[in-house]
């Protein structure tokens, strides 16, 4: 076979798909949560073996609303949603969810 025949049979290497960084993905999630909870006192991520999202609210009436909204937000990304006290802030309420991705 001639050299021209082999050249036409060579396929290029596939280009690797550029994945988004973890920081970019967390930033997008944070933006969505902030837009959903504009009155939240604080919204933070925490990692202690599992990635968790904490949404701190002022009024106790906001707890059930926040839990329901988190359950439906971002296509089910937030699971195991529960609430409790906010450390060092006795007048705030914390809604916590695990982040699944």
Image (cartoon, rainbow, N blue to C red):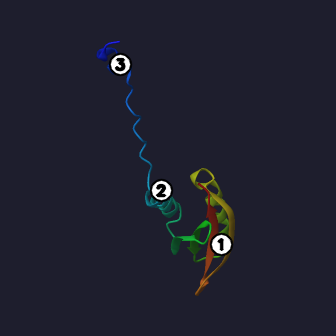
Q: State the residue in front, 62 or 16.
A: 16
- Give x and y (percent) for residue 1: 35, 12
Q: Earlier in the sequence, mark 3 or mark 1?
A: 3
| Residue beneath disc 1 | 61
Q: Are marks 2 and 3 in contact (CB under 8 Å)?
A: no
Given the current orientation, which residue lies at the most extreme front position?
A: 1
Q: Are marks 3 and 1 in contact (CB under 8 Å)?
A: no
Position of residue 62 in the picture relative to residue 18 (left or right)? right
Distance Cα–Cα, label 1 vs label 2: 30 Å
* Res. 62 in view: no
Q: Which mark is residue 25?
A: 2
Q: Which mark is residue 31?
A: none
Which of discs 1 and 2 lies nearer the camera? The answer is 2
Which of discs 3 and 1 lies nearer the camera? The answer is 3
SS at badge 2: helix
Q: Residue at x 49, y 66 (%)?
A: 38
SS at badge 3: helix
What is the number of callouts on the image? Answer: 3
* Res. 38 in view: yes
Distance Cα–Cα, label 3 vs label 1: 72 Å
Q: State the residue in front, 17 or 67.
A: 17
- Give x and y (percent) for residue 2: 31, 13
Q: Earlier in the sequence, mark 2 or mark 3?
A: 3
Position of residue 86 in the picture relative to residue 27 (left or right)? right
The crowding category of the residue bearing disc 2, from other C-alpha atoms within 10 Å (few below 14, some 14 to 19, many at least 20), is few
- In the picture, residue 53 is in which quadrant? bottom right
Distance Cα–Cα, label 2 vs label 3: 43 Å
Q: Which mark is residue 6?
A: 3
Q: Residue at x 63, y 71 (%)?
A: 95
- Give x and y (percent) for residue 21: 44, 56
């Amino acid at each position: 076979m001639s050299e021209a025949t082999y050249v036409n049979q060579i396929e290029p290497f596939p280009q690797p798909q550029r994945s988004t960084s973890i920081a970019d993905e967390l930033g997008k999630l944070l933006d969505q949560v902030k837009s959903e909870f504009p009155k939240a006192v604080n919204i933070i991520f925490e990692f202690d073996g599992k990635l968790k999202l904490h949404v701190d609210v002022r009024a106790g009436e906001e707890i059930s609303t926040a839990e329901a909204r988190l359950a439906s937000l971002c296509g089910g990304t937030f699971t195991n949603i529960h609430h409790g006290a906010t450390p060092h802030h006795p007048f705030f309420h914390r809604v916590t969810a695990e982040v699944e991705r």
